């Protein structure tokens, strides 16, 4: 019997805190990019988070085992996770952190399209296809209608935005791989461990090979690194997994749409990034589309009334 419950005040407060932390992830990487390579930062933070995760599992008496049946898909998921952050690191060198957050969080769109293709139970309905159309229209507006700030920077911002969008596609592919392989029955900690280990094994050498291995040892960069490794990559995921065990995942997922909103606001406030009307309009459509795809259970009653049809029981 499923004992998970609807959201209460504690869960809502925790989810708001997590969304704020996750939005600060890209802001933090961008803030110290001149002193610490984002690619190297993500690789090293993954190693620290993996060690903390193993220590936590042993403290709880859990076995730290990477099961043979999960090796293949685990390595694929780990490689996709590393690719995602390689693209994020490159994007942060070229475009604004607020852009990276928005385009990265298009991942649910790509996941929905991939699952629609692989799993009959995940077929998209009219509301979700409409949401995907709205979101991609928003992406087109954000890309093609450039404000003065982006036009002044020219091609690099457009390329950075494209890399961030590809990072979102890689994240979506990660979700599809987990759902469609033996990892769907693996413990969450094991799946996370594959991602962290592969990110370390692939991103650190990539940083050295591409000349992005600078890391200034000072209080500023070490503070950001501690935030990335301990708070974002370790503690926030422990809280997230705890929430998934105790509360309905569909209700928790709705809060995740606040992450790119926070990312845009914090990028403008903390980094002084420009406020572009065209990007904000496109971002609003992207978020609306993602919400329509992922939160269909809440929207279908209104959608049915809008189309003049009775509301069907949610899947």
Image (cartoon, rainbow, N blue to C red):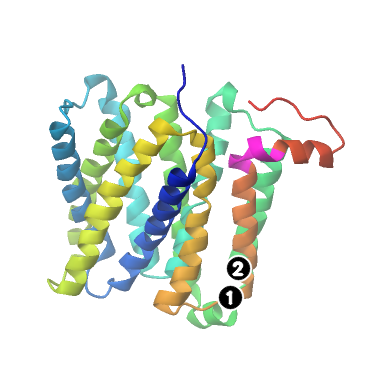
Q: What residue do we see at 35% from left, 26% from top? A: 183
In whole angstroms, how far apart are the C-alphas of marks 1 and 2? 6 Å
Residue 162 in view here: no
| Residue contact at pointers 1 and 2, CB within 8 angstroms | yes
Q: What residue do we see at 21% from left, 62% from top? A: 225
Q: Which of the two residues, 55 or 207, is positioned nearer the viewer here? A: 55
Q: Which of the two residues, 89 or 227, is positioned nearer the viewer here? A: 227
Q: Where is residue 87 in the image (x, y as percent from the top left)?
A: 37, 56
184 drawn magenta = no
- Whether residue 1 is situated above or below residue 104 in the rendered picture: above
Number of residues whose C-alpha sits closer than 10 Å to that of mark 2, classed few (under 14), some (14–19) or many (20 or more)? some
Q: Which of the two residues, 98 or 11, is positioned nearer the viewer here? A: 11
Span highlighted in magenta in the image? 293-299
**Does residue 94 appear to the left or right of 134 in the view shown?**
left
**Does residue 91 appear to the left or right of 276 in the view shown?**
left
**Does residue 53 appear to the left or right of 152 in the view shown?**
left
Circle 1: element type: loop
Instruction: Give me the disc on residue 237.
Output: none
Q: Position of residue 19 (x, y in %)?
A: 43, 54
Number of residues whose C-alpha sits closer than 10 Å to that of mark 1, classed few (under 14), some (14–19) or many (20 or more)? some
**Does residue 285 appear to the left or right of 155 in the view shown?**
right
Q: Position of residue 287 (x, y in %)?
A: 59, 54
Q: Main secondary structure of the magenta part?
A: helix
Look at mark 2 in the image and give the residue it sits on: 280
Q: What residue do we see at 49% from left, 41% from top? A: 8
- Whether residue 79 is situated above or below residue 280 in the rendered picture: above
Look at mark 1 in the image and give the residue it sits on: 276
């Amino acid at each position: 019997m499923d004992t998970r419950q609807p959201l209460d005040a504690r869960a809502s407060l925790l989810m708001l805190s997590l969304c704020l932390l996750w939005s600060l992830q890209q802001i933090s990487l961008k803030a110290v990019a001149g002193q610490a390579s984002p690619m190297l930062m993500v690789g090293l933070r993954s190693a620290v988070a993996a060690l903390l995760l193993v220590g936590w599992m042993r403290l709880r008496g859990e076995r730290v085992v990477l099961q043979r049946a999960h090796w293949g898909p685990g390595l694929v998921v780990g490689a996709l996770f590393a690719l995602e952050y390689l693209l994020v690191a490159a994007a942060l060198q070229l475009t604004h952190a607020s852009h990276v957050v928005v385009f990265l969080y298009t991942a649910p769109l790509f996941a929905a399209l991939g699952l629609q293709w692989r799993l009959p139970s995940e077929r998209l309905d009219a509301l979700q296809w409409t949401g995907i159309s709205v979101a991609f229209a928003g992406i087109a507006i954000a890309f093609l209608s450039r404000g003065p700030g982006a036009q002044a920077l020219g091609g690099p911002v457009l390329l950075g935005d494209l890399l961030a969008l590809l990072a979102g596609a890689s994240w979506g592919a990660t979700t599809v791989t987990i759902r469609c392989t033996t990892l769907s029955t693996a413990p969450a900690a094991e799946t996370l461990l594959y991602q962290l280990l592969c990110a370390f094994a692939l991103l650190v050498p990539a940083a050295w090979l591409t000349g992005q291995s600078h890391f200034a040892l000072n209080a500023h960069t070490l503070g950001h690194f501690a935030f990335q490794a301990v708070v974002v990559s370790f503690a926030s995921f422990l809280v997230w997994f705890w929430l998934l065990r105790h509360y309905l995942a569909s209700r928790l997922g709705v809060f995740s749409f606040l992450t790119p909103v926070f990312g845009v606001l914090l990028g403008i406030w903390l980094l002084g990034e420009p406020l572009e009307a065209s990007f904000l309009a496109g971002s609003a459509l992207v978020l609306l589309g993602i919400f329509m795809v992922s939160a269909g259970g809440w929207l279908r009653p209104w959608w049915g009334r809008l189309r003049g049809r009775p509301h069907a029981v949610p899947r």
